[in-house]
Image (tube, rainbow, N blue to C red):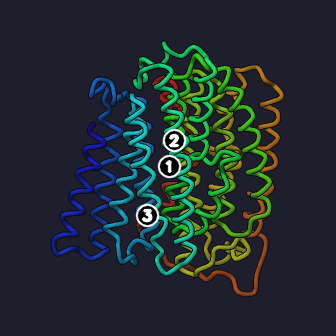
Amino acid sequence: MKPELMITTIIFLLLIIKLGKGMRNGPLLSLIQVLLLVNFLVTLFLPSDGQLFSGMYLTSPLIGLQKAILSLGVYLISLLNAGWLKKSDHLTEFMVLMLSALLGMEFLVSSGHLLMFFLALELATIPVAAMANFDLEKKASSEAAMKMILSSAFSSGILLFGLSLVYGSTGTLYFSELTAKLDGSPLQVTALVFLFSAFAFKLSVVPFHLWTADVYEGAPFPVTAFLSVISKGAVAFIFVSTLYKVFAPLSNVWQALLIVTALATLIIGNLFALRQDNIKRFLAFSSIAQVGFILVGITAAGPNGTAAVTYFILVYVFSNLAAFGVASVIADSTGRENISDYRGLYATNPLLTWVMALALFSLAGIPPTAGFFGKVFLLGAGASRGLVWFIALAAINMIISLYYYLRVIRAMFMEQQMAPVAGIKREQSVTFALLLCAGGVVLTGLMSWIWEYIRQLS
């Protein structure tokens, strides 16, 4: 439990600082960034293998790597949004909430018991709803928090009902014991459908995505980035583990559900992204489409699926956080959040433009960015089922997504407007994080040993 204990220590340290004389935001944020970096390095280089509490808590080198990816994402968010965080009147409270959500997600990934799984999911969800309301002077932020709470409460109710059916039909809540007691009875299939629906809410899978764009638009940029990358990554990790290890006897049921929802998610996410002008809503529907590709990879039902999803989430951390980072810098300096405001951005802010272009190329799956390799591995894993028409439709949606990603790039490089965004001064940490994300987008794809390492752990 080194990662969880490390995060808990940081939370208590921040609470002690808050209860004491306090610190100015600048030094405090620098301290938090150093602690988050240490947490990432400890999680990455000191993996464990074993279990605690009679199997309620499980860990392995692969789980350790997944936690390291989540910790890296939170570290990057703290760097990319330094300007907004320094201006916040409640920096300590915000970081305590974010770290509490990260703690819940790490317990979620290590869950070996359905009760711990539920408690960890709630710990990962409730603080994010409070974070969504941190732009206290904006009505949209309060509306986002309310929609987040209501959708989370609804999905939690569905999840609890599914868990009660699982327990009623098997008599156990331990993951290790459930597999042998699943016989495909109608009650168990119903329980699986409820559990699948709860996961679909958290992942913004169509038709459970209706809360996503409104919450993304109303929440502050750090929260939107956290929801889009860290929250989805954690749920995707435990989703894969639960389906493959626990509900393997019901694979025919959940693979059919995955195929239908993956295609619906790809199509709806792409079609709605085509018509968005607000950058947050644009990235919201973009992330919905990306989840569709993750579902394609999960249909593999084997080590290739686990490896492909883990690799793609790592690539997604760099790509999506780079896009959100650029959008956050522009919004924080100018108050502009529309794609139409990005016209002519290259003339005044070349670094921001190139980082955004690399991020969008990666999200679109254009070589040689890491996003191309990530989608190839996901489609390759999904192709192992032998459903050629399914993979062909997913690949067609990749081509559709090119249009709306290239629309943003065209606006930045080729279009002009009367009052372009002026040159923006950035925090050094923001520039460092943008370069780190851009490097990750390129190098993660070119360094083949990263994929091989993840595949070996899977």
Above or below for 318 versus 159: below
Question: Closer to the N terminus: mark 2 or mark 3?
Answer: 3
Question: Closer to the N terminus: mark 3 or mark 1?
Answer: 3
Amino acid on which the number 1 mark rests in the picture: Ser
Above or below for 389 versus 160: above
Residue at image x 68%, y 76%?
347
Residue 281 percent across, percent down from the top left: 67, 63
Amino acid on which the number 2 mark rests in the picture: Val
Residue 421 percent across, percent down from the top left: 64, 80
Exactly how many numbered labels are in the figure?
A: 3
Residue at the left extreme, as displayed = 20
Question: Residue 65, located in which quarter of the rendered image?
Answer: top left
Residue at the bottom extreme, as displayed = 418
* Image-based side of 311 in relation to 412, left or right: left
Quadrant assignment for the N terminus: top left
In the rendered structure, find residue 196 and report the number of the disc placed on it: none
Residue 438 percent across, percent down from the top left: 55, 55
Residue indicated by mark 3: 130
Residue indicated by mark 2: 235
Residue at image x 61%, y 67%?
217
* Image-based side of 426 in relation to 208, left or right: left
Residue indicated by mark 1: 231
Of 317 and 91, the residue lying toward us: 91
Amino acid on which the number 3 mark rests in the picture: Ala
